[in-house]
Image (cartoon, grey):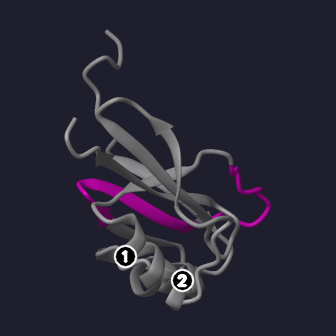
Amino acid sequence: MNLANAKVAQLLIPVEDFEKGVAFYRDVLGVPLLFAAPPQMAFFNCGGVRLLVGVIPPGQKAQRGSAIYFQIPDIRAVYSSLKSKGVTFSAEPHVVNRTPKSELWLAEFTDPDGNQLALMNEVAISGA
């Protein structure tokens, strides 16, 4: 037995302030809230993967390291919308890889707790 056929069902996003974390993912990013269990957990649906925004128990340190990439159809539109809501990006959307058939675009940012996030958009090259 191994994880060859497993799917990622849930990701934990550690936050310090429950209300601030919920507001960022729900109101700023627009990720649909499934349900909340205040004051420690809120669950969001992101394309079928559940995001658990959770307050780390006292005495435990939040482990940050994995970045979450949100695949979107129009990186410029989402970038502009989030920027107008106060999201600070490390750079404007940019190409990180080109193939003869497509370009992969990214725009990286962090949430209020420093968790690494990014917008990702794969664009077909016309005529390819």
Residue 62: percent from left, percent from top: 71, 57
Vertical order, 7 against 55 (above or below): above
Query: How far, Cα to Cα, is label 1 from label 2?
Result: 10 Å
Relative placement, left or right, of 5 versus 107 is: left
Q: How many labels does the image show?
A: 2
Pick the front one: 85 or 76: 76
Pick the front one: 88 or 101: 101
**Picture disc at residue 83:** 2
Residue 44: percent from left, percent from top: 34, 68
Q: Is residue 49 magenta?
A: yes
**Can residue 38 be spotted in the picture?**
no
Relative placement, left or right, of 14 versus 99 is: right
Image point (68%, 65%), residue name: 90
Give the magenta-colored segment's residue range: 45-64
Vertical order, 30 against 85 (above or below): above
Location of mark 1 (residue): 77
Residue 63: percent from left, percent from top: 70, 50
For the residue marked with disc 2, what is the amino acid? Lys
Residue 117: percent from left, percent from top: 56, 59
Tell which residue pokes out farthest to the front in this image: 127
For the residue marked with disc 1, what is the amino acid? Ala
Local crowd at mark 1 within 10 Å, few (<14), some, or many (≥20)? few
For residue 92, what is the image quadrant? bottom right
Relative placement, left or right, of 7 versus 82 is: left
**Can residue 36 be spotted in the picture?**
yes
- Viewport quadrant of the C terminus: top left
Image point (29%, 27%), residue name: 6
Q: Does the magenta stretch include residue 60?
A: yes
Foreground mark, 1 or 2?
A: 1
Tell which residue pokes out farthest to the top in this image: 1
Vertical order, 54 against 94 (above or below): below
